[in-house]
Structures are given as C-alpha cells and as structure tokens.
Image (cartoon, coloured by chain):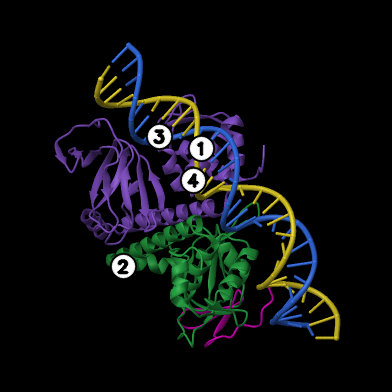
Chain colours: A purple, B green, C yellow, D blue
Amino acid sequence: MQRYSTAATITPQTSWMGSTIASDGVRVFAPYSPLFHEGDTTANFYEIVQGVARAYKIFPDGRRQIIAFAFAGDIVGFGHGDTYRFDCDVIAATHARVIPRSSLLRAMRNRPELSEKLLDMAAGAVAGMQDHSILLCRKTAIERIAAFLLSMADRQVEPVTGRRLSLPMCRVDIADFLGLTIETVSRTLTKLRAMRVIDLPDRGCFVIRDLGQLRLLAESELGSA
Amino acid sequence: MQRYSTAATITPQTSWMGSTIASDGVRVFAPYSPLFHEGDTTANFYEIVQGVARAYKIFPDGRRQIIAFAFAGDIVGFGHGDTYRFDCDVIAATHARVIPRSSLLRAMRNRPELSEKLLDMAAGAVAGMQDHSILLCRKTAIERIAAFLLSMADRQVEPVTGRRLSLPMCRVDIADFLGLTIETVSRTLTKLRAMRVIDLPDRGCFVIRDLGQLRLLAESELGSA
DNA sequence: CGTCTTATTGAGTTTAATCAAAGGGTGTGG
DNA sequence: CCACACCCTTTGATTAAACTCAATAAGACG
C-alpha cells in the first residue's frame, strides 16, 4: 500500500469515510482512497474539482486495465446504470463534488433539455473510448506514450509554466492504461528523452521540448527519427 | 469495390438513395451501401431489423478500425451528438428501421423516463466499448478470435441449427475489428479447427464443436491445449 | 473456362513481453 | 545527521507473439 501525507482540506465541515466534506458538496479524498467499487449500487456521481482519479477493472487473472483518468472538470460514476461498472479511486489528494444520483434523475425529469446534454456527454464518453480502443490496438509503444503525454498536456488546467507539466500517475498506472508493461513505458520515455522530444526532470512531471515532433509521433505519421 | 447481387425487398413502396422503403419505416439496404458517414449531420438512427451493419473509422494513414458490428435489434447512429462520429454501412442485404432524430428528441421531451432508458443504453455502449478495449489490448490472437466467435454465436437470432452459425463478415473485417492482420485471423481460425474446437465448413459460416473449450480460450484461463 | 477476389500457408523480421538485476529517492530508525 | 530499507524506476538479455512480405489455393462470377 501507498503512504501519503495528510490531505489539505477546503472549508471542512464534517468527516465521512476518510474524506472531508464541505458545504457545497465538495469532499476531499486522501490519496488512494476509493470513490466507489465495481458492483456497488450507483449512489453518486463525482465531479472532480481538483486532483486526479482513476477508473479501472481488475480481472480474475490479476490483469488490470485502467479505463480512464479523470481530472478537474471531469465527472465519473455517470452512465453506469444501477451498479458501478468499474472501480474508481483517487491517486492524489483530490477534491470532488458529490452529486447524488437521485438529484440528477429529478433534475432530468424537470428539465428534459438536460437529458440531451447528458446524452451528449455519454456520446462523448463513447467517442473517447473508441479513440482509446484504436490507440490500444493499432499504435506502437512510442505512439501510445506520445499520445498519452499530449493528452496529459492538453488536460493541464494550471497554466503551462514554461512547459513543466504534471504527470501525477506512476509508471504502472501508465502501463495499465496504455496496455503496456512498466518496462516498455520506462524504455519508451527514456527513448523520447534521448530523442530530445521530452525531458523528465523529476518524478511526477515532464517537459515537452519539441511539441511538433511529439505530435508527429503520436499521429504515427513518423515511423522513426 | 465490392460486387453484390440485387437485394431482396419487403413490401416495397418507394426507392430512395439505393434503398427501398416500406410503410413502417423499414428500408432495405443493398450490401455495402452506407447508412451514414462520419461528419454528416445526425439525421436518423437506424434499428437493424435483419442483416448486419458495421461501424468504422478510417485513419489518414489508411488504417481502419471497425468499432462494432450491428445485428438485428441493435440501434446505430445513436449517441453521436450533432454529427456522426464514424462511418457505417451494411455488409449484407439489410433491413433497417429509420428513426428520425427529431422524433426521438420529441419523444424524450414528452416522456422523461425514456431519457433514462436511453442513458442506460448509452451506458451499455460504454461498457461494451470498455470490454472491447480490454480485449484489444490484453488478449492474445487466439483469445480474441475465441471471444469473437462466442459473441457471434450469442448474437445469432436465428435458431442455432445444429450449431452451424453465420459469420457474415470477411476476414479483413474480423481483422480490423479485433486489431489483427488477416493472416493472423486466418492462421488462428485454422489452429482452432486443428484443435477440434470449431469447424469451417463453408465461407460465411462456422460451427462450434467444443463450446467449453472455446469459452476457456476466450477467458484466457487456458494458455495452450 | 478463365479471371478476379478472398483466404490460406510459409519464411523471416520486428515489437514488446518476460525474466533478471541494478540504480535512485524517500522515509525511518539508529 | 547518517545509514539502511523499501519502493519505484531504469536498464539489460532473452523469448514469444504477431506483423510483413511472398506465394499458393479456393471460390465467385462472368
């Protein structure tokens, strides 16, 4: 198990299940605490306010597939039907707004146009999964890593200071998301650094040195360089 | 391009864009005629009544990913937002009920509970994509083919006569769906036949000879046999 | 019957997984 | 404050799986 320091809290009011709850429904989750488990009754949706969550499935043979990482602004737990279809936890101290399922269903009944919005959101999720499928089955290790780093860069809410970007998940999480082993992830990152496309100054962050090249690699319009 | 014989029609009334339309909104599409293209404005949803459709994306470098096959009872074109997110055509003479998008949106406004159903459908689509992702990135060729054949068997609406099952798509379609090459698909099918797990009596069909073994292979609880 | 398309089979290559070991940073305890 | 231990990461060598290139075989259709 992972050690972690005490999570910072904002306007704390009550403590519940290892998280701290504020008046606006935002709770603070300590690193590696769960949002929900596969099979649980769908009680809440979670809007990530700050931090990172990961959604994943674990298989009988021990293989794990990370389905998605959720960053600020993303909503998780939505579109599962009556029970959650995967496990979800946070990989850093994370502020998440807890939205009871019942309140969303009520809102849907009152405002039909909301339903269309939610359907569009679901459509977006499907489209994202489709793109990710293609990444998983059609791209090489370097293409996957390049595409992954680009998507991390695109999703940084904080201003891109200099170009030092946060990479909050560990290698095994990246591997399980991209369908690679940690060795291949590590080797590929080293290769990209050797190619002067990225830099890896510290654990938990990376720097893009040649954005154009990274894009070319991600799009696989470039075989070698 | 593909050649095809003239499609059979049911209660034909008018002809439009290469398809025949019946009074209940069911059109008959000739093999390899499109339902819609990526980027088109979302005008209709299509409920497959009989036949098979395929949804796919084509990439700049020529790679193609088949996202899904749709059989009788499946609805395609749904959950795309304002424009279709992939191409869709039929691979055999196919009867499809054309549902105008506007009529569905109207129905959603009148009957909010319908929205929840549609959301559940979308959730199911997301779950299906997730499972397929895992298949694509975690499973070996033999596991993918076994899982694919099982899903084909499960989706046969027609009574499973003897166990002779329809396999309506060609090898390249299977390959592009499973993230393999046609050579690997062919070799793997041959291997399964040699293992006495399936039979391949004719083009366009297959027979399950050992369902238990096929299930074991698909679940990858069995490495070799 | 001949041509064209699709499928199968074979040989060699490439990629990433696996097995194995060493390096580096963090935190704890002496 | 320093040393040790642990975990995560990197690097190396080998193996296995699927891809590529190439040729042959089998159907479908005119």
Crowding at label 2, few (<14), some or many (≥20) Cα neighbours within 10 Å?
some
Q: CA distance from mark 2 to mark 4?
A: 43 Å
Of badges 3 and 4, nearer the viewer stands 4
Q: CA distance from mark 4 to mark 1?
A: 9 Å
Instruction: Output the chain of dot 4.
Output: A
Q: Residue at x 40, y 59 (%)?
A: B126
- Please report whichever mark, 3 or 4, sits nearer to the chain's N-terminal start: 3
Residue farthest toward the left in the current orientation of the protein: A14
Q: Which residue is mark 3?
A: A157
Question: Tag 4's secondary structure?
Answer: loop
Question: Tag 3's secondary structure?
Answer: loop
Residue A88 seen in this snapshot: yes
The label number, if any, that marks residue B114 in the structure image: 2
Residue A197 placement (x, y as % from top left): 58, 32
The label number, if any, that marks residue A181 in the structure image: 4
Residue B30 placement (x, y as % from top left): 60, 78
Task: Give the prevailing secondary structure in the magenta stretch.
Answer: loop
Question: Looking at the picture, does residue B38 appear above or below residue A55?
Answer: below
Residue A73 placement (x, y as % from top left): 35, 42
Residue A10 in magenta stretch:
no
- Magenta residues span B1-29
Q: Which residue is mark 1?
A: A186
Q: Are marks 3 and 4 on the same chain?
A: yes
Q: CA distance from mark 3 to mark 2?
A: 36 Å
Q: Looking at numbered disc 2 in the image, what kind of residue is underneath it?
A: Leu
Quarter of the image with the N terminus of chain A is top left
- Please report whichever mark, 3 or 1, sits nearer to the chain's N-terminal start: 3
Q: Looking at numbered disc 1 in the image, what kind of residue is underneath it?
A: Ser
Q: Residue at x 53, y 51 (%)?
A: A135
Left or right of B61 in this view: A163: left
